[in-house]
Image (cartoon, rainbow, N blue to C red):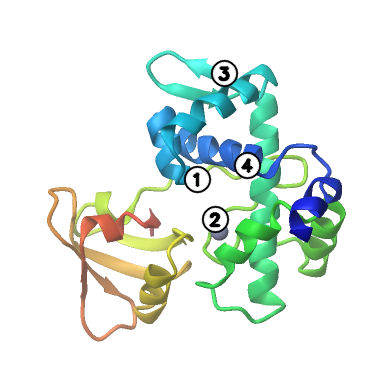
Amino acid sequence: MIDRIMFPTMKDTGLSRSAEDYLKAVYSLNERGEPAGTSELARALDVQPGSVSGMIRRLAEDGLLEHEPYHGVRLTPEGSREALKVLRRHRIIESFLVRRLGYDWEDVHAEAERLEHAASDRLIERMAEAMDHPTTDPHGAPIPTRHGKIAATPWPRLDEVAAGTRVTVRAVSDEDPEWLRYFKSVSVVPGARALVQRSGADGGPVTLMVDGASEPLSMRPAVARRVAVTEA
Ligand SMILES: [Zn+2]
């Protein structure tokens, strides 16, 4: 109960926790070029579609979202600034938990989902400074600067890469602890290099040989999709 009372007064933006979650969800759908309609948002936020339209309307009235014909909603520049602030808080918190408190990388997302709404900008900047301003979080995702700039990441997904390509792993999706444990166990972590032996573009399994491993790895395209890479 206490957290419900304290969260609004501890934040700097004045947005409610769920408004912040909506903006973040729209940001990540927009970023992937996917439609951000009522049903996509309901799925991303794990809420009933009926409750989505009211919040969309409020956020649009506040100038944070705008309707995009046939594509749901997109963030206005103001909405994008707010979403990037929440992403910064999330990723700094994840970084701090791993680097300073010794958390495993699969355990930090859930903590950050809670704390991102509670932490003040001042606390986040102190954390960033204590870590000498990291530019990526433990899963490889870029951390927006305090001025709201973020490195563009048009990174291909591992399932899209052609056979015979050497790749460097850039980032791994942070949401599912089970898959994060798996990726760590097979050394598919940011900075790892690998040779793609079989592409998943046809819907079949992706096969790759991670540098230093003794045998190739095979994974379903839906799993390989969780891994962002660049050619290396
Ligand atoms: Zn996370």
Is 139 situated above or below 145?
below
- The verdict on label 4 being within 8 Å of ligand 1 is no
Q: CA distance from mark 3 to mark 2?
A: 26 Å
Lateral position of residue 232 relative to residue 128, left or right: left
Q: Amino acid at mark 2?
A: Ala
Q: Position of residue 197 (x, y in %)?
A: 18, 65
Q: Dividing the image into four quarters, tell me where ligand 1 lies.
A: bottom right
Q: Residue at x 87, y 54 (%)?
A: 122
Of labels 1 and 2, the one closer to you: 2
Residue that mark 2 sits on:
141
Of labels 3 and 2, the one closer to you: 3
- Can residue 32 be seen here? The reply is no
Q: CA distance from mark 4 to mark 3?
A: 18 Å
Using the image, tell me which numbered label, if any, was put on residue 18: 4
Q: CA distance from mark 1 to mark 4?
A: 26 Å
Q: Are marks 1 and 2 in contact (CB under 8 Å)?
A: yes
Residue that mark 3 sits on:
66
Q: Position of residue 128 (x, y in %)?
A: 78, 61
Quadrant of res 95: bottom right
Is 170 situated above or below 87?
below
Q: Amino acid at mark 4?
A: Ser
In what element is the residue under mark 3?
A: strand
Is 28 situated above or below 74?
below
> Mark 2 vs mark 4: which is more N-terminal?
4
Q: Are marks 1 and 3 in contact (CB under 8 Å)?
A: no
* Pointer 3 local density, CA inside 10 Å: few below 14, some 14–19, many at least 20: some
Residue that mark 1 sits on:
153
